[in-house]
Image (tube, rainbow, N blue to C red):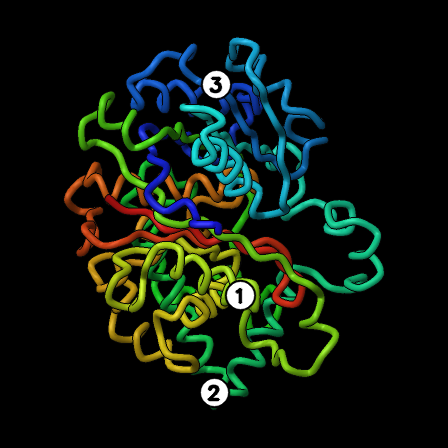
Amino acid sequence: MASGIRDKVAIIGMGCTKFGEHWNKSADDLMVDAFVDCLKDAQIEKKDIEAAWMGVCFEEISVGKSAIPLSIALKLPFIPVSRVENFCASGTESFRGAVYAVASGAVDIALAMGVEKLKDTGYGGLPDFGQAMGSRSRMILANITAPGGFAMMATRYFAKYGLSREEGKKMLARISSKSHANGALNPKAHLRKPATVEQIMKAPIIAEPLGLFDCCGVSDGAACAIVTTPEIAKKIKGDDFIRVKALQIAGTSGEEMLYTDWDGTYVKTTREAGKRAYAEAGITNPREQIGMMEVHDCFSVTELAAYEDLQISPVGKAKDDIEAGFYDLKGEVACQPDGGLKCFGHPIGASGIRMIYECYLQILEKVPEERKIKHPDRFALTHNLGGFPAMSVCSVGIFGR
């Protein structure tokens, strides 16, 4: 009977570039930058890596259709390399490949890389969704945009839980303001200026009720991880590593749009992936056992939904926790301690591993005092979401000592 991967895999090294507008660097350059830092941190040699995975979404913009650019850029020694894509969850998909390879016993040490270059397109948002999701998307979601889809979620949430437009927008503004305060402390973030609730509420509307600060931007960046068994990790790094406690993924079956059970105020794949991840990690009370979260805040309302979908805040009651500072950097469950997608932007293939990178730093307390969370001794969670509220794929990871 399947037993899961809990405590079977350790992360011994990680690297992450600064995210931003890297006009002077190619995707290869970004991968090399992240890999050099990762290899140094892991305290191994390149020849020790036995397999590698690369996550990238829009391959025609970044690296091409195969994983060969990863082998060439890093000069990997003729090992198996694989390119994976799962829309905005592509980074975690890459990590999952490396983790499962180690957990299965197929290899001892594996590399996961995530990379994307989106600023070179000259376009302000993500490239064509129809192109990325196939002809089915063009038929079902022909007239929807990402801001539009999540704006409808916000409007429905406000209506269901009795919030006025002003109350709802202020709640979302507090979420974004918190993340911008955290990002201002992080030298690797793309956007490093604090934003007040008042500034956020006065910003131009993108898709009612979501304004400019409710939406993350696109970016260039790369992040990578080296994983192995806990036994090998101890020999190499003593106690200077973290363990993968759970890694679960859920993809839509389409039922959200086929039946009337789903009311548009939550993301079903997040609930399913989160529930299975908690079971795999042995978590019975997420609100008290989780110390930090890196969630997929493509929009402020997505972060709001994640609070409840991941069973941290009671359904319909997240507003109380937001106002109480529960998710602030020094709060009980710090959310987006690095600034999140709001401040890093979203180079799709890199985002999932960037989230894990922050968990790694916080658990091992490798951040300056001003950036430290309140409970690094608790579990850390990542939530990497791709698609729309009604058509999504979600990966949830749990990490700890």
Horizontal arrangement in the rendering, residue 153 relative to residue 168 (left or right): right
Disc number lying in front (3 or 1): 3
Check disc 2 and report the residue beneath it: 161
Check disc 3 and report the residue beneath it: 50
Dividing the image into 4 quarters, which one contains the C terminus? top left
- Residue 132 shows in the view: yes
Residue 178 found in image quarter: bottom left
Disc number lying in front (2 or 3): 3
Which residue of the protein is positioned furthest toward the front in this rendering? Answer: 1
Residue 23 found in image quarter: top right
What is the crowding at mark 2: few (fewer than 14 residues within 10 Å), some, or many (at least 20)?
few
At label 1, the amino acid type is: Gly
Tell which circle, 2 or 1, labels the residue nearer the N-terminal end: 2
From mark 2 to mark 1, how far is it between C-alphas?
Answer: 21 Å
Give the mark count: 3
Horizontal arrangement in the rendering, residue 185 relative to residue 168 (left or right): left
Which residue of the protein is positioned furthest toward the left in this rendering? Answer: 369
Residue 206 x/y as whole percent: 60, 64
What SS does tag 3 mark? loop
Check disc 1 and report the residue beneath it: 211
Q: In the image, what residue occupies the spot 33% across and 35% down? A: 10
Residue 71 x/y as whole percent: 57, 16
Residue 89 x/y as whole percent: 56, 47
- The reply to whether dot 3 and dot 1 touch (C-beta < 8 Å) is no
Q: In the image, what residue occupies the spot 47% across and 57% down? A: 297
- Residue 202 shows in the view: no
At label 3, the amino acid type is: Glu
Disc number lying in front (2 or 1): 2
At label 2, the amino acid type is: Tyr
Q: In the image, what residue occupies the spot 49% across and 37% down? A: 100
Horizontal arrangement in the rendering, residue 102 relative to residue 394 (left or right): left
Tell which circle, 3 or 1, labels the residue nearer the N-terminal end: 3
